[in-house]
Image (cartoon, rainbow, N blue to C red):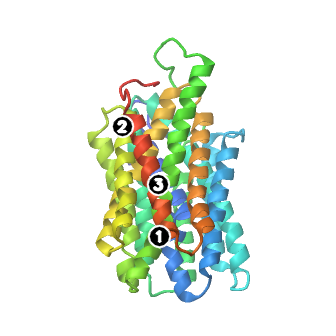
Amino acid sequence: MSASRSFAPAGEAPSAWRIAVIGVTALAVAMGIGRFAFTPLLPLMLRDGSISAGTGAEWAAANYAGYLVGALTASRLSMDPRRGLLLGLLGVALTTLGVGALSTAMLPLGGAVLRTLAGIFSAWTLVYVSSWCLAELAKRGVAHLGAWVYTGVGLGIAAAGVFAWLGGEQSARALWLELGAVASAGALFVRWQLPNGPAAPVPSAPSRTPPSARAAKHRHGLLVACYATFGFGYIIQATFLPAMARQQVSNPLVFGLTWPLFGLAAALSVAGAARWLASWPRRRVWALAQATMALGTALPLATQAMWALALSAVFVGGTFMVATMAGLQLAREYAPDDATPLLARLTVAFAVGQIAGPVLVRVLGPGMWAGRDALFWANALATILLAITALFLLRRPNERHA
């Protein structure tokens, strides 16, 4: 592939693949590091004594809150999506480096602030990648490549997990700096590859009778509700899985494997869906992902043995990005002329759902309820909601605007 900043003519495959590579890299940095690097580093920070479990929960909540703010502001910022994408990646790199550079005294408060900012920048990146990359690929008549863009999230999670796994004997502070360097390299690569000039217009959707505003709002609302449920459903595992595994095995080379497994499952599942489920209706793909995720959240209800946690990592990690991909692609079908507002609404709903998970665990506290702890009840509620929304999404899966 040419190293030139300019793109090939619109119809040529290398140009389309370059756009996809930009999206993969951006999502790997923004989500794998900006959003989820803290998950595999949390047990190592607890081991080092650099933060407490309570501070860890506050950092997680701060990042989720920042993600919500980013989702709320993404569609309100009047900027070229490419500019927003670069700003998001730069912010992720700087905030990640910043956590590693903080003194021990400033770490609790300063880390929470930086993780809030990282959440904002991550949400901006996701929204702008989805807006710009999918539109550019659709213009070139290769919209199916959009599915491959979302493998970046799983690849980023797996890479961050491998860093924490192989570098588990290092201090967590050193790992934050190393991941910040990786994020910086990713941001520079995207800056180098992005084209200059105005964004390409998106082709008009096939003509059809436009739905009424009220009907469209209702359909979008149902879509948003399913996406919020998905955000709640996956977040317990995405936040606490390595910590749960650490309770079973103290060796970081063992419990640290759960997060790379989670990310690898995410990347492979999206690639598999792009390869074999491209012709399926997006609602059916989403329903399949939501139902499989329900199995993943149900497993720890039966046992927290390592084999069950590993399967949970595969089932949840292997579906959360498929659900993300299908939901965002469906949003582009619902609003082909300008999908950014609906994409932002979905991201807001996702952020609210994922905030609700840790908040529920925090509210229930360390005590036992009917003989079960907070993680059990959070997983039980997630399983029920995921199963209900999977059944809803299966209704009339061939109807694009049902």
Please give the residue where the numbered disc 3 appears in the rendered image: 382
Crowd class of label 3 (few under 14; some 14 to 19; many from 20; radius 10 Å): many
* Helix, strand or loop at mark 1: loop
In front here: 166 or 346?
Answer: 346
Q: Residue at x 55, y 16 (%)?
A: 211
Q: Nearer the viewer, residue 142 or 210?
A: 210
**Nearest the eye: 107 or 388:** 388
Q: Which of marks 1 and 3 is nearer the N terminus?
A: 1
Question: Compared to 399, does 68 lie above or below?
Answer: below
Residue at 59% x, 29% y is 338
The residue indicated by pointer 1 is 372
Q: Distance between the residues labelled 2 and 3?
A: 41 Å
Q: Nearer the viewer, residue 126 or 249?
A: 249
Instruction: Report the residue at 72% width, 74% height from top.
Output: 110
Percent of width and height locating residue 355? 60, 57
Residue 158 % position (x, y)? 40, 65
Q: How crowded is mark 2: few (under 14 residues within 10 Å), some or many (20 or more)?
A: few
Whether residues under marks 1 and 3 lie with C-beta atoms below 8 angstroms apart, the answer is no
Q: Label 1: how many residues lie within 10 Å, few (<14), some (14-19) or many (20+)?
A: few
Q: At label 2, which amino acid type do we have?
A: Ala
Mark 2 and mark 1 lie on one chain; the one further toward the N terminus is: 2
Mark toward the viewer: 1 or 3: 1
- In the rendered image, the quadrant that contains the C terminus is top left
Q: Is residue 20 visible?
A: no
- Residue 92 in which image quadrant: bottom right
Where residue 87 sits: x, y (%)? 65, 53
Q: Is residue 76 above or below residue 238?
A: above
